[in-house]
Amino acid sequence: MTDTPQQRDERALLEASRAGDSAAVEELVRSYQGRVYGFAMRMCRNAGAFFTATSMIGFIAGAGIIVRNSIILVDFIELRMAQGMPLEEAVVDAGAVRFRPMLLTAAAVVVGAFVILFDPIFQGLAISLMAGEVASTLLSRMAVPVLYYMAERRARAAHAKAA
């Protein structure tokens, strides 16, 4: 059975994170970011909407939500580590505990944007919000914990080496 490009990228992301290759992980995350924007633009085109200024406002709003979710996830990881939990467990626990709020936020955005989906002026905003939120929720659920784990592990190794 042949893998799709996404499956190959996910497998490469996992292998690179296990090997500690942060440059490869960053490159894969950037390719996913491009896919998120491309996905939202294709959704606009497929829905018969143009990519307009309101679509860009939708991108900015969606980016703000995802950044907030990512900051809360990292803060939760650090809180768990401050409580004495090992790094690996803290990353997994934070991802598990914060999954429902992140998913509910994305669902609320999608449902809220659906209300304005049929307005010709704000249709692009609704489509970019909906598509961007779904795609970026999946991306942030995978990329943020992996990148944090790699960065923290590297910082700990450098600190142990210096000591």
Image (tube, grey):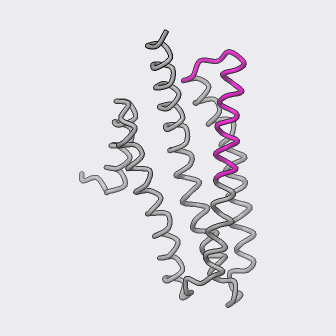
Instruction: Please tell me in which quadrant of the rendered image residue 64 appears.
Output: bottom right
Left or right: where 71 falls relative to 12? right
Query: Residue 87 at what x, y percent from top left?
Result: 57, 22
State yes or no: residue 49 in magenta. no
Asked if residue 83 is among those painted magenta in the image, a careful observer would answer yes
Residue 92 against residue 50 in the figure, above or below: above
Q: Who's the residue at 55% across and 87% down the image?
A: 50
Q: Is residue 157 above or below residue 134?
A: above
* Quadrant hosting residue 135: bottom right
Horizontal side of 30 relative to 99 (left or right) equals left
Residue at 50% across / 17% down in the picture? 159
User: Residue 71 location in percent, x, y?
Assistant: 67, 43
Q: Is residue 75 above or below residue 65?
A: above
Whether 138 is drawn above or below 122: the answer is above
Q: Residue furthest left?
A: 1
| Location of residue 86 in the rendering, given as x and y in whole percent from the top left corner | 59, 18
Q: Which residue is more in the foreground, 77 or 163?
A: 163
Q: Residue furthest bottom?
A: 120
Q: Main secondary structure of the magenta part?
A: helix
Q: Number of labelled discs? A: 0
Counting from the top left corner in percent of width and height, residue 74 is at: 64, 37
Tell which of 30 and 46 is nearer to you. 30
Residue 83 placement: quadrant: top right
Q: Which residue is found at the position 64% from the left and 54% from the top?
A: 66
In the rendered structure, which segment of residues is drawn in magenta? 67-88
The residue positioned 50% from the left and 32% from the top of the image is: 151
Instruction: List the single residue furthest toward the front.
Output: 162
